[in-house]
Image: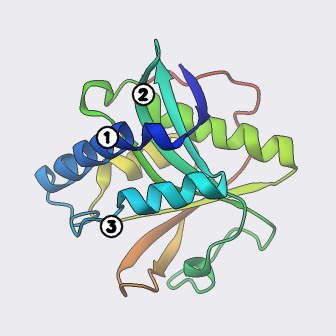
Amino acid sequence: MEIRKTVQTDIPVVMEIIGDAQTYLRSCGVEQWQDGYPTAAVIAEDIEKGISYVATENGEIIGTAAISFDGEPNYAEIRNGGWLNDEPYAVIHRIAVGNRHRSRGAAANMMLFAERLCEERGVGSIRIDTHADNKSMQRLLERLGYEYCGEITILSSGASRNAYMKRAGCHAGRESYTTP
């Protein structure tokens, strides 16, 4: 698997993958992403900012994620816990894998890629949030060494999300992650 920056011509495939994720979440009873978010405009903005990535296998786009080093306003306040530290951090958002590639390690590889980006930039931690009912993402986060830190509020909607954090570098140098 290779991971590269997303380009504008990738948007239709990225949106198909997001559609797969929305359908999967709905089938699991998870309300996350059921309101039309993220849109193609959000992905286009991520591309312009240089934070959108796609995972490819044999030239086929199989997953997508946004990896930002610009902070996250939604993370300014955390309830029922606290962040592991107050140092600069990366944020992973909008991570999704297409139906045909689910449970094959693509999401984990994108997260390990984020760790490598952190190492290259000298950033010591990564933060991510997910819906309280998104058990598959929570299992992945725990398997990769992320720690539950509390709850954050999405400022634009008022929705609550579970917040996780990991000190980067625990898997530094690993080229890939294989699901057990």
Q: Nearer the viewer, residue 160 or 58?
A: 58
Could you tell me if the residues under marks 1 and 2 are in contact, i.e. CB atoms within 8 Å?
yes
Kindly identify which residue carries mark 3: 132
The residue beneath circle 2 is 61
Q: Nearer the viewer, mark 3 or mark 2?
A: 2
Would residue 169 be visible to someone looking at this image? no
Q: Is residue 2 left or right of residue 140?
A: right
Q: Quadrant of residue 83?
A: bottom right
Q: Residue at x 31, y 34 (%)?
A: 98
Image height check: is 162 above or below 55? below
- Label 3: few (<14), some or many (≥20) within 10 Å? some
Mark 3 to mark 2: distance in Å? 28 Å
Please tell me how crowded label 1 is: few (under 14), some (14-19), or many (20+) other residues with Cα within 10 Å: many
Residue 180 on image: x %, y %: 42, 22
* Residue type marked 1: Ile
Instruction: Say which label, 3 or 2, has the lower sequence index.
Output: 2
Answer yes or no: is residue 114 visible: yes
Q: Residue 17 got which mark?
A: 1
Q: Regarding mark 3 in the picture, which secondary structure is present there?
A: loop
Rendered residue at 74%/37% (across/down)? 116
Q: Quadrant of residue 88?
A: bottom right
